[in-house]
Amino acid sequence: MIPDSPGGGRAAFVVVDWGTSSFRGWLMSAAGEVLAESRGSEGMLHCAAGPGFAPVLSDHLTRLGALQGVPVLICGMAGARQGWVEAPYIKTPTRLDALHEGAIRVEASGDIRILPGIAQAEAGRPDVMRGEETQLLGVTESDFTGLVCIPGTHSKWIKIEGGRVVEFSTYMTGELFSVIAQHSILAHAVETGAAPGDSPAFRDGLGAATAAPTGLTASLFRLRAAQLLGFEQRAHGSARLSGLLIGTELADAVWRHGSPRSLRLIGAGTLGRLYEAALTAQGLDVTTVDAEQASRLGLAKAAARIWGAT
Amino acid sequence: MIPDSPGGGRAAFVVVDWGTSSFRGWLMSAAGEVLAESRGSEGMLHCAAGPGFAPVLSDHLTRLGALQGVPVLICGMAGARQGWVEAPYIKTPTRLDALHEGAIRVEASGDIRILPGIAQAEAGRPDVMRGEETQLLGVTESDFTGLVCIPGTHSKWIKIEGGRVVEFSTYMTGELFSVIAQHSILAHAVETGAAPGDSPAFRDGLGAATAAPTGLTASLFRLRAAQLLGFEQRAHGSARLSGLLIGTELADAVWRHGSPRSLRLIGAGTLGRLYEAALTAQGLDVTTVDAEQASRLGLAKAAARIWGAT
């Protein structure tokens, strides 16, 4: 039996955001309504290491109550070289509404496709994304012009002109935060635990970084020196470190891609609010969209282009 | 018996560079000749964790053939809060030739003193050094004006005017190299092992960083993306990472402290040669002094001021 939405929509396809360490699937109506949802921790790393991808998908389809043979569209790391089937990167500049044309069909019973990532295949500024392109499709109109920021382990800034991704940059902000807080001398100066929220120490770090954005590697040592000399408490180290890294990212991204007419932020939770605060503090006018919703919207848009409205 | 130098100098004092993880001591004549040398791995961490400082020094004095009661002057982490006896920081601006006035006497039989570190105790740019101040004394004339660069785990850039340390900055360059190469996603892109030397990949990283010094955290991800997209080999990752970090340090230091009339580099080994190449590539005219020699010269200068020429 096919579950129906409260509005009575009939199940048209399943969409899946299959990341490095998570699986999120939705049964959708052709009109884009969510009929059912299934989540798990069977990300790309888990599947590649053991059970494979097909059985994991099959389990989730059962949980979603999807009929045999329902079309499935996947985005994210399942399409990486080390994933299920490689969906080769399409190259910048590229229209977001042509993303579905690069989808790769999985050799399996039924119609299962994986969306491609996007590569900036230029020797001077090589860069890649996989998963974020689908979020971009989800949050932009077909003629969108502006900048999109997607914070995270590897934050992305994407410049879009008339619905085309023209260039983008990835910042190792989130990963550097973890690595520095855990493995460097700053482990003595930063309390680990909950991610820091907005605070005076965060704003101070942000201000220091945007005022002197070439000085990150000196500011990191100063964070420690400030505590040794009694200017700052250890309790504020984490927020200051976060401010320094996010401020450095922000200053470079705006310098690199220009101060935008329109800025969309794809974020969630504490980190999303932190970026919102940081961008607003820089005088930027930002519209925030939830990250998971962005993925689902993008997948649904691409699926509707492949299989049409029924 | 007091060992005599080939020139016949009589032992006047012992000087010790006592760092975090090493001990280097020299028996010196009043004229500054080295009469004997003793080295070990009994650094501050080792001594603080177990045997204490006095017995380790005593052993080395015996190995040096020093007479009972010979005066000893120490610099480095033995004077840190977690060291033998804390020698409180003296504050910038400060004359290097007044360093010996801040020496702290250890409560022990004989005359044993520890030189202080230097602190930049300003809320906006807090910074500290301990050990490097003695190297600075060693490599500068009493009226020196210029910039000194001391590369390492925590690289220092020091602005000196008329023999006074007026400001300095510490860059976490060496430590970030290790932490990123070992604990981040770049572990897949960087071969660990021997420190990288000068090479085209090092120069490329240097050039990228000095051309866009706000972009370090993006350049780090690009290092990985370049390999994914086939623009670069893993074998060159280490040199590129080194170039990116050193280039970022260099660009910020020159922006912060001004392009110097006179630039001294206190370095040794592969890292010293790498900085020499980097500074020269930036059109800077650099004079290199060996790091160990700099420490010994500084200690000897300060010792001569304390105990006079005999």
Image: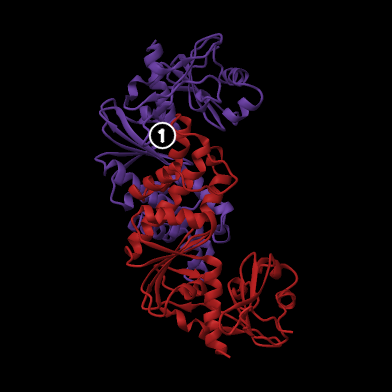
Chain colours: A red, B purple
In this view of the protein, which residue sits in the foreground, B129 or A42? Answer: A42
**Residue A95: image x %, image y %?**
43, 81
A129 versus B25 height, above or below: below
Q: How many marks?
A: 1
Q: Quadrant of the C terminus of chain B?
A: top left
Does dot 1 land on a helix, a strand or a loop? strand
Q: Residue at x 70, y 75 (%)?
A: A53
B230 versus B117 height, above or below: below
**Residue A151: image x %, image y %?**
49, 60
Chain under label 1? B
Q: Is residue B128 left or right of residue A64?
A: left
In this rendering, does residue A269 appear at all?
A: yes
Q: Is residue B100 left or right of residue A34?
A: left
In this view of the protein, which residue sits in the foreground, B107 or B222? Answer: B222
As shown in the figure, which amino acid type bears the numbered disc 1? Asp
Quadrant in the rendering for residue A112? bottom right
Q: Residue at x 70, y 70 (%)?
A: A47
Q: Is residue B100 left or right of residue B161?
A: right
Q: Is residue A29 left or right of residue A149?
A: right
Q: Which residue is mark 1?
A: B127
